[in-house]
Image (cartoon, grey):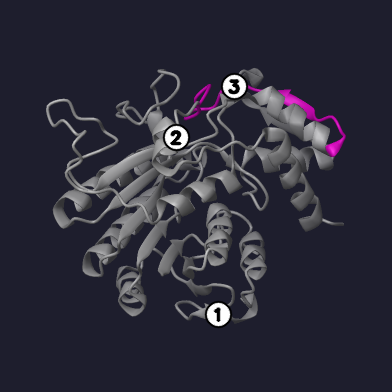
Amino acid sequence: MKVLVTGAAGFIGHHLSKLLIKEGYQVVGIDNINNYYDPNLKLARLEDMKINTDHIQYNVPVEGDITFVKLDLTDKEEIKNLFKKYRFDFAVNLAAQAGVRYSLINPHSYVDSNITGFLNILEACRAYPVKHLVYASSSSVYGLNENIPFKTSHHTAHPLAMYAASKKANEMMAHSYSQLYDIPTTGLRFFTVYGPWGRPDMALHIFTKAIVEDKEFEVFNFGKMSRDFTYVDDIVESVKRLIPLPPKPNNPDFDPKNPNPAISSAPYQLFNVGNNSPVALMDYVQAIEAALGKKGKIVYKEIQPGDVPSTYADVQPLYDYIDFKPSTTIQEGIKAFVDRYLELNKS
């Protein structure tokens, strides 16, 4: 079975591609290898999948454990040509402009990558149908909602930043294509993913780097925050199980007079993917300190625009659907990250 993984040089895409290879899938991965963060980390992830990064050219396949193609989601014609060439059974769209705070600085990049790019994937799926399109949404779509835990049945009309708005737009776009063209789509609202090979703009990497280098680091809202931190292996296991389980049309549970946003009469569904166990931010920091055997130099700050004080995922619908619930503890996950971080950053 052929599966496309967009963002294959990214954090989650790298882990998912490796897992799908073990499961016997033929994986084609694409990534534009942009400079939002150090491209060398993206190249290192590709090298971990036996891709010779010396030979990467735009739109030229390179063979390793996966077939890798450097390609931008905004390249409409070449995205469609890719689908025509490989005739994918499944597609997993993880490529996106990430980061809530960066969206305050460069909102246009979120429209280009997350909206125009996703539209190109949907159009390619329309032209060359797949059995299932799985795509990354985000817990940030819950925005001003303070009903805890967050449920996919909640309405999400109040995003706080352009990143969240673009992910909400993805969900709505997917629904329209599921409705109009019978494309089975599943949106996944990821909750604070962390683990080895994680992005350098994420809190775990920032905190770890600062502690290792004996530098100060900022903790926002004076540390009074909590997150449903979800280990990357639990994330990709969930995605792997979902890929062969597309939603079916005419869901008998959908009531058009009282519509649940997570399901539809179209082949469309949404799930939270979280640990279902929020952790106080300061407990998270202490777990990093314990893994490193060293105290950090914390500078407390007010909450930043676009941030929310807490996240907490209701994952029961996901558990019922795939018989799997994320369970990795932060102690286990942080130790795995720290071990990989120290290995990648040997002096």
Q: Earlier in the sequence, mark 1 or mark 2?
A: 1
Q: How many marks?
A: 3
Q: Residue at x 19, y 34 (%)?
A: 254
Q: Residue at x 83, y 42 (%)?
A: 212
The image quadrant of residue 116 is bottom left
48 or 238: nearer the viewer: 238
User: Mark 2 or mark 3, which is nearer to you?
Assistant: 2
In this rendering, would 103 be left or right of 260? right
Estimate how packed mark 2 is, as few (under 14), some (14 to 19) or many (20 or more) residues with alpha carbons within 10 Å.
many
Q: CA distance from mark 2 to mark 3?
A: 15 Å
Q: Residue at x 56, y 78 (%)?
A: 56
Q: Earlier in the sequence, mark 2 or mark 3?
A: 2
Question: What amino acid is labelled 2 in the image?
Answer: Ser
Q: Is residue 96 above or below residue 70?
A: above
Estimate how packed mark 1 is, as few (under 14), some (14 to 19) or many (20 or more) residues with alpha carbons within 10 Å.
some
Name the magenta segment's main secondary structure.
loop
Q: CA distance from mark 3 to mark 1?
A: 44 Å
Q: Which residue is mark 3?
A: 225
Query: Which residue is the extreme one toward the left?
Result: 257
Q: Secondary structure beneath disc 1? A: strand
The answer to whether the residue labelled 3 contacts the one labelled 1, judged by CB atoms less than 8 Å apart, is no
Question: What amino acid is labelled 3 in the image?
Answer: Met
Residue 240 shown in magenta: no
Q: What stretch of residues is rendered in magenta?
A: 292-311
Question: What amino acid is labelled 1 in the image?
Answer: Glu
Quarter placement of the C terminus: bottom right
Q: Which residue is mark 2?
A: 139
